[in-house]
Amino acid sequence: MCSWCWGFSPVIRQIKNTFADRLKISLNLGGLRPGTTTPISEQLREEILHHWHEVQRLTGQPFRFENALPEGFVYDTEPASRAVLSMGKLQAENTLAYFATIQSAFYREGRDVTQTEVLTELTLPFGIDAEEFQTLFNANALRAQTWEHFKRSRQAGVRGFPTLIWQEGEQIDTLCTGYRPWPDIESLLEQRLSAGDRP
């Protein structure tokens, strides 16, 4: 639930389509606003919507602005992150696709992806059993793993989203932080690969 990550979603898809046979690609969740319990303020709402307009302008990604972030909305990003990890355990090959589905539901359709029922419904196109998904999603162990993802992101030096990280063994390098268009990312990855690096 990071607007710049939504803007970057087509680039992630391109990375997967272009480099999946040459790189191991994995998703680590940073937790933009995990555990938030306070309803969004009008000031924060205006700031966020300003960012949304900027993301749409620069990336072309669609947003629904009408009734976006309604009064009383609690912008907690932990449930969506936990849902993505749940999908990773049930259908690892569809993790990125489900992640994009959640993003689209939130930004394009204005759905509340902090709600278990919505996150469960979004698994249906993937043929996931709703009860199995919710059992996993609500497990304390998965909650702990979700927070571990957030911790790993901080330890890797992630301070903004999206961030592309290149890892080889224990060596971790930040390739870029923030939105970059696909030609820039393709060039960056090709340079790394031609230099002989293998993550």
Image (tube, rainbow, N blue to C red):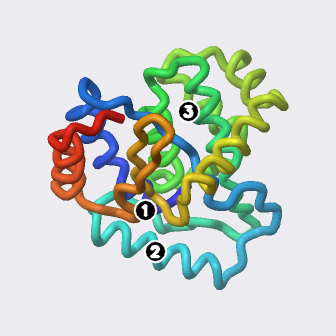
Image point (42%, 41%), residue name: 167
Q: Nearer the viewer, mark 3 or mark 1?
A: 1
Image point (66%, 67%), residue name: 70
As helix, strand or loop, the secondary structure at mark 1 comes to: helix
Q: Is residue 87 left or right of residue 179?
A: right
Q: Which residue is mark 2?
A: 51
Return the x and y of residue 100 as percentages of the image width and height: 44, 41
Q: CA distance from mark 3 to mark 1?
A: 21 Å
Q: Nearer the viewer, mark 3 or mark 2?
A: 2
Image point (47%, 79%), residue name: 50
Return the x and y of residue 23 as percentages of the image width and height: 31, 31
Return the x and y of residue 77 as percentages of the image width and height: 66, 53
Which quarter of the rendering shows the C terminus? top left
Callout 2–callout 1 Cβ contact below 8 Å: yes
Corner quadrant of residue 175:
bottom left
Question: Label 1 sits on what residue type?
Answer: Trp
Q: CA distance from mark 3 to mark 2?
A: 25 Å
Q: CA distance from mark 2 to mark 1?
A: 8 Å
Q: Is residue 184 left or right of residue 144?
A: left
Q: Is residue 193 left or right of residue 149?
A: left
Corner quadrant of residue 16:
top left
Question: Label 3 sits on what residue type?
Answer: Leu
Give the mark nearer the N terminus: 3 vs 2. Answer: 2
Which quarter of the rendering shows the N terminus? bottom right
Image point (25%, 28%), residue name: 22
Please, which residue is most extreme toward the bottom here? 43
Q: Which residue is mark 3?
A: 122
The mark found on residue 4 in the picture is: 1
- Tell which of 67 and 1 is nearer to you: 1
Position of 31 relative to 42 (above/below): above
As helix, strand or loop, the secondary structure at mark 3 comes to: loop
Query: Within 10 Å of the Cα at label 1, are there few (<14), some (14-19), or many (20+) other Cα atoms?
Result: many
